[in-house]
Image (cartoon, grey):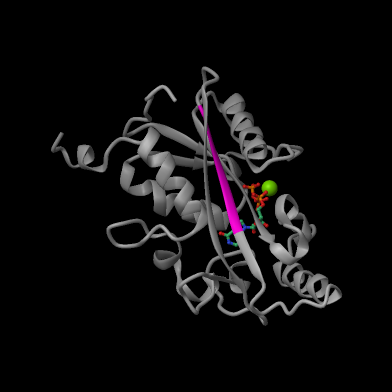
Amino acid sequence: MTGRKLSAGTRLVVATHNKGKLAEFRDLMGPHGIELVSAGELGLPEPAEIGTLYAENAAIKARAATAATGLPAVADDSGLAIDALDGAPGLFTADWAGNPRDFAAAMARVDRELALRGVATAGARAHFVSALSLTWPDGEEAIFEGRVFGTLAWPPRGAQGFGYDPMFVPDGLALTFGEIGPEAKHGLPPHGQGLSHRARAFMRLAETVLPPLQNLAGKA
Ligand SMILES: O=P(O)(O)OP(=O)(O)OP(=O)(O)OC[C@H]1O[C@@H](n2cnc3c(O)ncnc32)[C@H](O)[C@@H]1O
Ligand SMILES: [Mg+2]
């Protein structure tokens, strides 16, 4: 890393078409004074996610947004890895929801695949991974990763969050990501603990490339 930072007031493209992720990015970035615009809002095409690592797919999405707009971009590539399924769905977590996306069906497939292996879904070990790629118009790039470990719940519980949130219980809690709400899922210190995979990756990104929060209050 070069120590380069995004400055307050910078326009940053969030290279996602996922509204749940976008809402989390707005919560996470908002306090830093970065102006966010999403790839979905700009009508940018979705690039093919052909990488073999989360970090590669995140970079593919961020690079495409920077190339199309001339602006710095951030993208998330994420997934749910289930130990008893040898890490599946992993990079294919979105694909398991089909097209158009149906996460009730995706979660039912997780339950079916575990049953085929004689494993109870409730209590099965799993973790979420998030890779965040940040790209600058001159080609500089940075990658940040975060993960959260936990167990699966069955049947799914809770209507908050998105994707597979209703079937994931982070270690240390008894509630699913669908039940705990945004502040508990990805709120940052001092109010939250940066629990989710995306919040953890974001904390690394913030330390490295965002301006310190106190500078925004006019104290610096
Ligand atoms: O590629 P973009 O446009 O960002 O949006 P996407 O939904 O296709 O996102 P991914 O390719 O990164 O696929 C990640 C999948 O993992 C799921 N996922 C990722 N983070 C999650 C979270 O915090 N809670 C629940 N599900 C999550 C999500 O719903 C997707 O199905
Ligand atoms: Mg995707």
Residue at (50%, 25%) from the top-left corner? 136
Where in the figure is residue 182, as x and y percent of width and height? Answer: 44, 65
User: Which span is picked out in magenta?
Assistant: 128-135
Q: Which quarter of the image is occupied by the N terminus?
A: top left
Q: Position of residue 110 (x, y in %)?
A: 76, 69
166 left or right of 195? right
Task: Give the camera-side residue of 53 and 166.
Answer: 53
- In this rendering, the answer to whether 24 lies above or below 206 is below
Q: Furthest-left residue in view?
A: 219
* Left or right: 200 in relation to 157: left
Residue extending farthest bottom:
155
Quadrant where the C terminus sits is top left
Instruction: Write down the quadrant of residue 132 in the picture.
Output: top right
Magenta span: helix, strand or loop, mainly?
strand
Horizontal placement of 193 versus 117: left or right?
left
Taking the spot 55% from the left edge, 62% from the top edge, the residue there is: 149
